[in-house]
Image: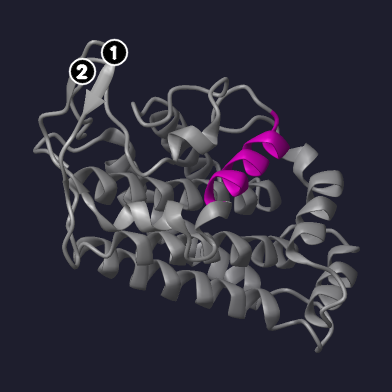
């Protein structure tokens, strides 16, 4: 990240403690049955701890490890959502998840059909269900160690050249190869998680008008990032390990 701090980073720093404090109180105050009453709270703790570890790993150049932890945060977020969305049927779905009777995918499908329509648009003009589907799909390849995840272990050096239609780049391979672009982008993925959790919380706490405005501004700033160039683009491509601008230079915000 260069000396000019992106707007989304500044807004995320402001929004994260407010969102997490509100969600913490909401998960602790749910009135579900004893079998699953603590489940959303535990999922939120897991998410907070995973983000902490992911941030530490990211700063030390362990970008692949940070990204894998980020994917786990998304799974936890959906469980948190069941605990705070306010739908009576959510407790039944949570009990089935707790008993291993439904998968994480089935859990998201229930949220898509029953809860997400109330959230309106995502970061752009797309329905919330499309936003969440694309975000989850973009992170899915990093749920397990794979060749795609391994690409986050290397550093893309500046000085990419484009000659006769072919791209030439130098890649540095070493333990904990810190890549400022990768570090910035993973931080942005964490900001998207905060944005999503904030929207979920606000949907059930509409009196939080100031926080709502902050979350809207965060979403707008994230959607304007050069790493996310609009809802018409395949999110999977935007989450590739290697990105560079059309003029052949790496993008470093």
* Residue 117 image-quadrant placement: top right
Taking the spot 44% from the left edge, 41% from the top edge, the residue there is 239
**Position above or below: 72 against 118:** below
Q: Position of residue 6 (x, y in %)?
A: 24, 35
The reply to whether the magenta stretch includes residue 72 is no
Near-viewer residue (14 or 109) = 109
Q: Residue at x 55, y 41 (%)?
A: 209
**Contact flag, marks 1 and 2 (Cβ < 8 Å):** yes
**Secondary structure category for the residue under label 2:** strand
Tell whether 100 sits left or right of 155: right
Q: Is residue 100 above or below residue 203?
A: below
In this image, 49 relative to 91: left or right?
left
Q: Quadrant of the N terminus?
A: top left
For label 1, the SS is loop
Give x and y (percent) for residue 80: 65, 66
Relative placement, left or right, of 19 versus 251 is right
Above or below for 184 versus 71: above
Q: Which residue ends up furthest to the top in the rendered image?
A: 164
- Dot 2 crowding, Cα within 10 Å, few <14, some 14–19, many 20+: some
Query: In the rendered structure, which segment of residues is drawn in magenta?
Result: 127-139
Answer with left or right where residue 160 lies relative to residue 39.
left
Residue at image mark 2:
162
**Residue name at image x 23 percent, y 10 percent:** 164
* Residue nearer the viewer, 187 or 248: 248
Q: CA distance from mark 1 to mark 2?
A: 6 Å
Can you see residue 48? yes
Q: Quadrant of residue 229?
A: top left
Residue 203 image offset from top left, x and y in percent: 68, 47
């Amino acid at each position: 990240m260069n000396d000019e701090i992106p707007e989304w980073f500044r807004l995320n720093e402001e929004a994260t403690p407010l969102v997490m404090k509100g969600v913490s109180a909401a998960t602790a105050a749910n009135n579900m049955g004893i079998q699953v009453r603590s489940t959303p709270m535990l999922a939120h703790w897991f998410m907070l701890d995973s983000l902490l570890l992911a941030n530490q790993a990211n700063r030390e150049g362990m970008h692949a490890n940070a990204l894998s932890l980020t994917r786990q945060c998304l799974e936890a977020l959906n469980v948190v959502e069941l605990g705070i969305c306010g739908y009576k049927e959510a407790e039944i779905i949570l009990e089935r998840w707790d008993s291993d009777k439904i998968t994480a995918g089935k859990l998201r499908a229930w949220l898509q059909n029953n809860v997400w329509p109330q959230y309106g648009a995502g970061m752009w003009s797309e329905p919330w269900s499309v936003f969440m589907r694309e975000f989850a799909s973009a992170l899915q390849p990093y749920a397990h160690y794979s060749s795609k995840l391994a690409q986050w272990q290397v550093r893309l050096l500046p000085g990419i050249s484009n000659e006769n239609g072919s791209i030439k780049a130098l890649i540095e391979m070493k333990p904990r190869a810190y890549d400022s672009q990768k570090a910035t982008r993973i931080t942005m993925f964490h900001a998207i998680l905060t944005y999503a959790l904030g929207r979920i919380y606000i949907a059930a706490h509409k009196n939080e008008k100031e926080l709502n405005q902050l979350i809207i501004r965060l979403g707008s700033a994230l959607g304007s990032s050069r790493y996310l160039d609009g809802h018409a683009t395949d999110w999977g491509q935007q989450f590739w390990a290697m990105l560079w601008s059309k003029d052949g230079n790496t993008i470093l915000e």
